[in-house]
Image (tube, rainbow, N blue to C red):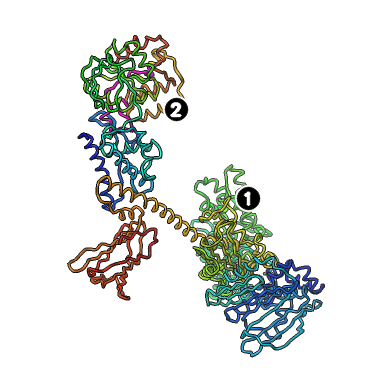
Amino acid sequence: MTSFQSTLGEESGIAEELAENQQSISIAEFFEKNKHMLGFDSGARGLVTAVKEAVDNALDAAEESGILPDIYVEIQEEGDYYRLIVEDNGPGLTKDSLPKVFGKLLYGSRFHVREQNRGQQGIGISAAVLYSQLTSGKPAKITSRTQGSSEAQYFELIVDTDTNEPEISVEETTSWDRPHGTRIELEMEANMRARQQLHDYIKHTAVVNPHARLELREPQEHFKFERATDQLPEETEEIRPHPHGVELGTVLKMLEATDSHSVSGFLQEEFTRVGTKTANSVIDAFRDRHYGREMRWRPPASHESIDIEAAATDATANKGADATDAFAKTIADAVADHDRIAHHELREIVADAADAVETEHGTTFGETVQENALEAVWLALLDGAAVDDGAAIDIDPESRLVTDLYELADEATSTRKDDAVVRAFAERLAGTFADAAAEDVRQRLTRGTLEERVDRAAELTEEYDDVAFGDTARENVVEAIWDVMGTVPDEPPLVRELSDDRDAASDLVDGMRATDIMAPPTRCLSPISADLVEAGLEKEFDADFYASATRDAEVHGGDPFVVEAGIAHGGELDAEGSADVLRFANRVPLVYQRGACATTDVVKSIGWRNYGLDQPGGSGLPKGPTVIMVHVASTNVPFTSESKDAVANVPEIEDEIELAIREAARELKSYLNKRRSMQQRRKKQNVLGTILPEMAQKVAEVTGRDEPDIGDALARIMNNVLVERRVEQNGDGQAVSVTVENNAETNESLEITDIVSAEPTALPDDATVVEMDGEWFLKWEPEVGSDDEATLEYVVPDDASFELDVKGVETEKLTIQQ
Amino acid sequence: MSADNDQARDQLIDLAAQFYDQFELGEIPHMSVPTRTKANIEYDEDSNVWVYGDRESTRSANSVRGARKLLKAVYTIEFLAEQLEEDRSSTLRELYYLSESWDNDEAQFNDQDESNSMIEDLEIVSGVTREDFHMRPEESGATIMGPLHLREQTRRGEREIHCQEDVGEGGYQIPNNPDTIEFLDTDADFILAVETGGMRDRLVENGFDDEYNALVVHLKGQPARATRRITKRLHDELELPVTVFTDGDPWSYRIYGSVAYGSIKSAHLSEYLATPEAQYIGIQPADIVEYDLPTDPLSDSDINALESELEDPRFQTDYWEEQIELQLEIEKKSEQQSLASHGLDFVTDTYLPERLDAMGVL
């Protein structure tokens, strides 16, 4: 891997530009000009950005050392200024690295790495330092303590705005209560108008970093977010780019920079998921595009008058009759063995025949002899004849080319096409092959040329025969012919040739895209995982329902990415207004530019009514108590700007965002449907629950009998699961039976606990009993099919009392008759 | 309480007991009644009337709607049983208003159609007629004029009435339950059932009942059950031929249909109400042409009604198919009174004698 990789991708262009700017103007001037891009365009925003950059850095620092992050953020009012303090429990920094990390713009260990990380450009925290210095004139105050050291180091750091060089102005040892970590104190011109965004940022960070403990203390409020898991995100590894995701410009740069000489070596060295086999597939695809394929014709069948042997014999002079005959016969036999044959295959046959005959007869068949034989046999196959400067092929309806192409076209077009029309078309197409033979007798052509030829022949057919020869028919014919054509054996150009040949490089890129290649490895990514997405949401949002989905890794621009989505609904979430969309990139909450973000666009484009949410007008953000969360993890998240506020509209990423959201939304839908049907059931139950007893009472009045028992009827009406106890006196004890009657349409698994005040006996095998404080807990877990029954029977002494507890069935669906 | 009342009451209470048993057996309470639509009536070869077929609708407590219906049924049963016990009667409309006084909101009827239909359900399921429940329609007001002597059992004692001599020009008013009447004597030769009041008055004024010994029964549009019942009894007991005289339009053919074949809504009582031997006098579509009567064009709804009658099993006879198709062809209809275009006496002097003669009644 060359260091060149660092300048790949769209953002690198801007980064290079930034770096160049630094040379011509002072850093302060540069910052002033670019602060909007860096997220420091207002005092309110600047504070949030500074918090964000400092926290991102702190999280990364701790995670990289395998420490569960514990981060403390404090904002203090300081006269006209605000003081920001961020403390982490990371490994701490050494004196050497510290000024670079905090002081020099564009320094960062991550900038050159294809690996998922929060900060990607190395601009963030140093920009915050600079912002603080420029607005307050105060140095950044940094305390750091490395693991195991007994004392902490205290530094004051300022950036020389002329040279962009950090300088440590104060350095002393101090004591600090954290055993290791870093504390940074920045004073800056700011205000708290963006308080809400600040809270959101911290809260959302807690959602996507369930392994982190966060604390925020600002002048008015104080929040603590505890961990939901002790599991650190998996460590990520650096990977090479994936062939499906690189663009031509990138490939050209890579070609220039690589140490490989061959294309195969280049592919295997510089890309992930490419071995010899895949490299060969890519090179074949490149050959098809760059050189074209050669048409493979059928060798003559036995009834045909073409005599390959004679043609070869005639073309060979002065080699002795036996050797010539053997040479010609070997060629003819080899040709006959082929189902179809291309020029380069014939060349090989001729060469092999020459070798074989030379071994046997001692006669050398030199290059010229071979060429002559090749040409003669090839033209014989084509029904053509040699002329002065190439070959001429006359096409008549009986010629071999026509017959061959007719068979292919006939097979490829619909049976409704008139035979004569297909034949006329084949004749015209054969004509184009014959014409081309004058220039290249090898019949070598690219797919594009083949398409042109088929088009021309089809158009002529339409014109003269007055029939339709549509696009589908043309495509099918092209496909059929292209299929029988053979990839040429030409050596691909060397890497250094390719790097100068834009067209050839473009063919290589096309070939890379067309080849099936395994998806990139995901060890460079660290998705949160569906479970922890849910845990994070549960931790910070008090909802009734949570769902999440993690997609498989995909590629964009050579960078793998994973999209995750989570949905929380109901409960204490705000029912008024639109759903909240929480956007994350590499575990960093995006709080600004919501409208410019691909995530928001995708959420708005989904038809939420399908998923049971309210969506006025059928588009836009859904209404109601819903939180939708999307996390894009990638080695290179494409942002719309350097301030990293919004994910750019990259189609591959948008597709995955949509699929992830839909996956989670499907769960939401089935939850909402179920809830709705439970509501209806409850409503029906409420109404019937009043009507039926009244009816029963009335029926009893009219008939003059006691009120009938309606529990069973009610259970049946509600398609309910009925659990019913019957007790019978049985001499000196009671025989108890508990019957489960499933009137529902689905199978039900119940967990029934019968709490009995005396010891039950004569239990069946599938029931267990445990005694606790004079009560017997009888557990029975039957599975009862739709419209089926199960019964538990046992015996207890006379004076026993019972209590049934049933789980596994929704209360709405359950009727218990004790 | 009479024996009849006892029986009706027992049958109602049996119905309630059925619901009771269903509850006890853990079944979903339900009752099944024949579907009361055109598609579910069929010709009964034995009695020559149209009765319900096999299709049934189930009122089941499985749904909220069905449960409400059954609750109302039980309340209605209670009310009817009490009414029978006290030997009182009420009208269908009274039942509807009375339900408002029931202690249970869910049991109250939403409109009179619902209570009427409930009574029909109960009639069918219990096998007791509405009259035996002591339920009456609001008004009947239909009358008879003609040489008939009868005895009526009224709440105020027996009355012997001659339907020409003891009544005014309005005629004898048919009571709600004609089964309380005993026919004593008659000089009548046939029954002439007339649709409209105007024509009935014309016939009486012209003395048609007297001259031809006709019992003129005023149908007052679609005839009430009592009118159909008395017509049936007059036919069966006094062996009088029945003729029906209505306007010449599709709605009037249905009036004839319910006299002769029974109505769709009361097909369970067809045997009791319908007179299959009743003959149709007119106005026939053929008469419109023959007598050159003043006409109105058929409206769209008339045409729909005629087409629907072509599919009605009751009208699938050669005679009716021919008449209805002729009418669809001439696209005209005429009222009974249009005969007046040939003079006020034309109907009694010419039209009816000619038609009755042609039908073999005179």
Q: Quick check: B8 left or right of B61?
A: left
Task: Determine contact: label 1, label 2, CB under 8 Å.
Answer: no
Q: Can residue A333 be seen in this view?
A: yes
Q: Which quadrant of the figure contains the C terminus of chain B?
A: top left
Q: Which mark is residue A798?
A: none
Q: Where residue A382 sits in the image (x, y, percent)? A: 58, 58
Q: Residue at x 53, y 73 (%)?
A: A228
Mark 2 Cα-neighbour bin, 10 Å: few <14, some 14–19, many ≥20: few
Give the farthest residue toward the left: A731
Q: Nearer the viewer, mark 1 or mark 2?
A: 2
Mark 1 Cα-neighbour bin, 10 Å: few <14, some 14–19, many ≥20: some
Q: Nearer the viewer, residue B273 or A730?
A: A730
Q: Which of B282 and B26 is in front in this view?
A: B26
Asked if residue B359 is among those painted magenta in the image, a careful observer would answer no
Q: Which quadrant of the figure contains the N terminus of chain B?
A: top left
Q: Is residue A498 visible?
A: no
The amino acid pointed to by label 1 is Arg
Q: What stretch is highlighted in magenta?
A: B258-286
Name the image quarter holding residue B116.
top left
* Vertical relation: A402 (above or below) A565: above
Circle 2 sits on which residue?
B301
Name the image quarter holding residue A260.
bottom right
Q: Which residue is drawn at 41% across and 12% down?
A: B340
The amino acid pointed to by label 2 is Ser
Circle 1 sits on which residue?
A456
* Vertical relation: A89 (above or below) B80: below
Q: Residue at x 17, y 67 (%)?
A: A731
